[in-house]
Image (cartoon, helix red, strand yellow):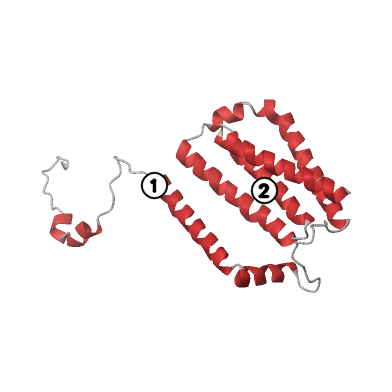
Amino acid sequence: MIQAFVFYLFATIVITSGVMTIASRNPVHSVLWLILAFFNAAGLFLLIGAEFLAFLLVIVYVGAVAVLFLFVVMMLDVDFAQLRAGFARYLPVGILLAIALFTEIVLAILARGAGPIQLGRRAAPIDPAVGNIEALGALLYTRYVFIFEAAGLVLLVAMVGAIVLTHRHRSDFRPQKVSDQVRRRPEDAVVNMHPGVGQGVEL
């Protein structure tokens, strides 16, 4: 009973957080909703016994959200002074969210200890003798190897696109010209000046 309750709780929060990530006008709020969605998705992984995927989702993807947050700051020039001005006003909401996340973690641990969820006849059989990471690696690099490679290609394209978007051309920036530096002669780089007594050097 507790497994089904926790599953529907986490699934509802994941869907709600995903919708709010898209619907929020403030990019910082969208990032926070996305972090909440990742945490609840990790809880769903815990329920089906995929502990490795749950911790991987929290460690890797929440860290990636921090990088996404950095790109948002670089591209949109968010005014953090204005955001910090309402810190005291939103502090109770932040405390409530922290308590809710802690409660969800406790519920996920209790539901995981109560036994696995009955997923139906279409669920893939899992050998208890095979570890979680070993079973995942065997599936990724045998049955789903092409999908895995395609996902890596999509991530590579996204990384290149992010670099292109953040690369700005500045009018006051003088780029380095290696060919001009190679062709430069010593007599062009050093100029002998003969100032008079008591006179300075005019550049």
Residue 55, label in figure: none
Image quarter of the C terminus: top left
Residue type indicated by callout 2: Phe
181 vs 57, nearest the viewer = 57
The residue shown at (81%, 71%) is 128
Quarter occupied by residue 24: top right
Q: Position of residue 173 (x, y in %)?
A: 30, 44
Residue located beneath label 2 in the image: 38
The percent position of residue 86, horizontal first and vertical second, equals: 63, 26
Q: Residue furthest front?
A: 121
State whether residue 72 appears in this view.
yes
Where does label 1 land, which residue? 167
Q: Is residue 101 shown above or below 130?
A: above
**Residue at 77%, 56% in the rendered image:** 46
Q: Nearer the viewer, residue 105 or 95?
A: 105
Position in image of residue 110 (x %, y %): 86, 52
